[in-house]
Amino acid sequence: MRLEIPRLNAVAADLPAAAVRALRNNPHVEFVEEDVKRYALAAATPSRPPYVAGQLVPYGIHMVQADQLPDTYAANRKLCIIDSGYDLNHEDLSGNTVTGSYDPGTGWWYSDENHHGTHVAGTIAAIDNSGTGVVGVNLNRRLQLHIVKVFGADGWAYSSTLAAAVDECAAAGSNVVSMSLGGALPSRIEIMAFNALAAQGIMALAAAGNDGTTSIQYPAGYPGVISVGALDENKAWAPFSQRNSKVELSAPGVDVLSTVPMGAGVHATLKVGGADFKPGVIYNNVPGAFSGTLGGAATTTPSVSVSDTDGAALNARLGQEATVSVEPYNYGYYDGTSMATPHVSGTAALVWSYFPSCSAEQLRRSLGRSAQDLGKKGRDDQFGYGLVQAKAAYDRIRTLGCGN
């Protein structure tokens, strides 16, 4: 037996085919299914180097109107992040109220070898701390967080692991569950877990997927889960974002700046002929030395990339002195519906904190009805009901009441 989920009366185990067939024929066993995989749904590398000097409000915070609400709510909501962990030592995250647990497969919740979970957490709750780094949707340290670590450095987990994680979120007293993850196949054990979550009045949100197709990914495809698609800074649909009948809300998911484990990000500078350029960073995306045009052995040569526009400008400066530096940093830009999801889950927790008497289903309706309609009029497969809007949802509930 690999995993037991007592509250769902289920277990996960590695079995030979004959044993699986025997269990399926056993009248005392409700069902047997493959333990399908779930993956973190973000780009594998930063899309450009991180911000350096001073505190920055990422564009997504403005887009979802998180900066437009009065700072009057109480610490009455708990948000559970199911992901790869949380860097508890991070300068922008250490001031939050955070709990979690130890898992024998992935380790302690306060470590993050994959970096994905810390990036998600920063969008939700990076704190406003005197010019350091960035801010999240909930920036004043009042949101309670619970972390369930299901991913290690490889960035995938089984559906049974996710079902157990959902159960842990509920047991921890969470109001919102944020999942920047998914996979192609549905799972009955997950359906049981999310049905139980809904019955307890807990809101669940998941990334729609990054294949840019019409296929449905799970858990975003389950009825009790809000499926979140991705937009860019201009509120345009991100071409990698899934488009289908399950997409419910959209949020920023392109070039999203947030926290990564301390020192795990990179900051690059490029100066040529006295002019500053904005470089990207090239590095190996698999374990081992950087090879190819830089040779087959490990190298300490700083390597950066530039846009086509900057490349043309650099051509005009051939022969001039150039300075390149690549240094560790604590922030990074990432793409993915993984990055859109924490904008919506963070907004849900923020708005709900003003109106804790609203039910999860009422809040879900209010978020949909107050979203900024994009694309075709009304709900559509690219944008869902549109861009989530914190202030519009707050105003709607305050005026019309919960769920109207």
Image (cartoon, grey):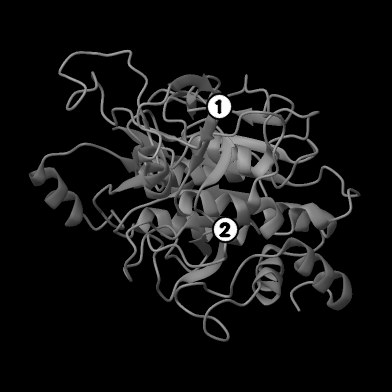
* Position in image of residue 72 (x %, y %): 91, 49
Amino acid of disc 2 = Glu
Q: Is residue 382 above or below residue 42?
A: below
* Mark sitting on residue 11: none
Amino acid of disc 1 = Ser
> Residue, x 59% and y 72% (percent of image)?
386
Residue corresponding to mark 1: 101
* Residue 92 quadrant: top right
**Along the line of sight, the residue nearer the viewer: 205 or 330:** 330
Q: Is residue 137 above or below residue 54?
A: below
**244 left or right of 369?**
left
As measured in the structure, the alpha-carbon distance from the residue carrying label 1 to the one carrying label 2 is: 36 Å
**Along the line of sight, the residue nearer the viewer: 104 or 98:** 98
Query: Is residue 383 visible in the rendered structure shown here?
Result: yes
Q: Is residue 145 above or below residue 385?
A: above
* Mark sitting on residue 233: 2
